[in-house]
């Protein structure tokens, strides 16, 4: 089994496009070297197109979705049900991280989930601190709390320089979702 | 055949990690919706791990490498041979873009290739201008020329906030390469 000798904690944050796709691309690259990835998606219940294509790489990449983001559009705080789903997602991801079966763990949109009070920053701090040395951990999402930037080894800010949202384009299937 | 109704030109630039992986992740997402992608990699002859895993998605994603970057390490300008390879890469990618067979065209590291005089900025301007409306075009690489930022619909700067290169880590197989 090919394993990472040294794993780090990576963060992809910022208001630009490319955070989730960079994490997925990283998992695909890792798969080419035989590394195994577990991806937990938060605040995404919608069946993003990657769910379908990653099935072709299921020997190396597992992806699961844990909670939605409807409360954001209702301008509410997450309800008990969503909080429970997010808690479960983190628990499952932690179990996978500690199982010795995965080289790469991705918590997609976990950072923005702290902003919307779905996940506590302290829970992510605890998650990062439990990371085994030979596991790479990637967290994505806008609004990364400063404490996590301090803890991470690599932080990239995806900065929006120009976006076609300004032209009134919202979400195109296969590109944005 | 599922096709894009409206395709844009996207740019991923900046000194941070995640430009190529974001483009690959985009291709993987697109594949999940049945869209077809052609990827031309410039300044990369080394067999990056993604070449292997993308074979599992070859029904949707084709990836080819056209020229190396050895001249950079020799602190030379690219020689005739490399220039010819880059020229061929652009020509092949343009042919694919105009063939009507691909929804997404990725010119990986084409932007940094202009910085190292391997590709002329004018050639990329001409490439972008020839893009059919229903094709999405993605260009990646550091040092994006200002003229291309003007032309593109979406520009994301991957900004390095913190990097483990500072710890003396260079390239890990399956993660960086």
Image (cartoon, coloured by chain):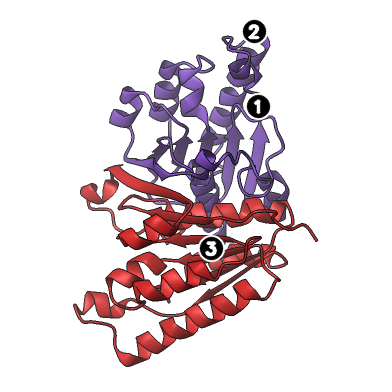
Chain colours: A purple, B red
**Circle 2 sits in a helix, a strand or a loop, which is it?**
helix
Q: Chain of mark 2?
A: A
Residue drawn at x 32%, y 45% is: B159
Residue at the spot of label 3: B50
Kindly tell me whether residue A170 is visible in this rendering.
Answer: yes
Q: In which quadrant of the rendered image does the C terminus of chain B lie?
A: bottom left
Query: Could you tell me how far apart the alpha carbons at marks 1 and 3 are, in whole angstroms?
Result: 27 Å
Nearer to the camera, A126 or B9: B9
Question: What SS does tag 3 mark?
Answer: helix
Residue A135 higher or lower than B84, as above or below:
above
Residue A136 versus residue B107: which sits nearer the camera? B107
Tell me where residue A121 appears, x and y as whole percent: 42, 18
* Marking on residue A80: 2
Asked if residue B175 shows in the view, the reply is no
The residue wearing badge 1 is A66
- Which callout, 1 or 2, points at the residue further toward the start of the chain? 1
Q: How many marks?
A: 3
Work out how far the residue at label 1 is from the one at label 2, CA to CA, in angstroms. 14 Å
Q: Secondary structure at mark 1?
A: loop
Q: Do the residues under discs 1 and 3 have CB atoms within 8 angstroms?
A: no
Q: Residue at position x 43%, y 59% from top?
A: B151
């Amino acid at each position: 089994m090919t394993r990472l000798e040294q794993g780090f904690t990576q963060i992809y944050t910022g208001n630009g496009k490319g955070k989730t796709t960079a994490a997925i691309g990283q998992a695909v690259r890792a798969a080419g070297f035989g590394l195994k990835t577990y991806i937990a998606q938060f605040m995404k219940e919608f069946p993003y197109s990657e769910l379908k294509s990653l099935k072709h790489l299921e020997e190396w990449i597992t992806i699961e979705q844990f909670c939605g983001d409807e409360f954001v559009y209702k301008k509410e705080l997450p309800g008990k049900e969503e909080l429970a789903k997010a808690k479960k997602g983190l628990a499952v991801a932690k179990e996978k991280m500690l199982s010795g079966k995965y080289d790469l763990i991705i918590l997609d949109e976990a950072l923005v989930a702290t902003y919307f009070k779905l996940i506590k920053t302290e829970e992510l701090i605890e998650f990062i601190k439990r990371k085994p040395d030979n596991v790479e951990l990637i967290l994505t999402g806008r609004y990364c709390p400063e404490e996590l930037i301090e803890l991470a080894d690599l932080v990239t800010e995806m900065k929006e320089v120009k976006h076609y949202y300004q032209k009134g384009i919202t979400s195109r299937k296969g590109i944005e979702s």
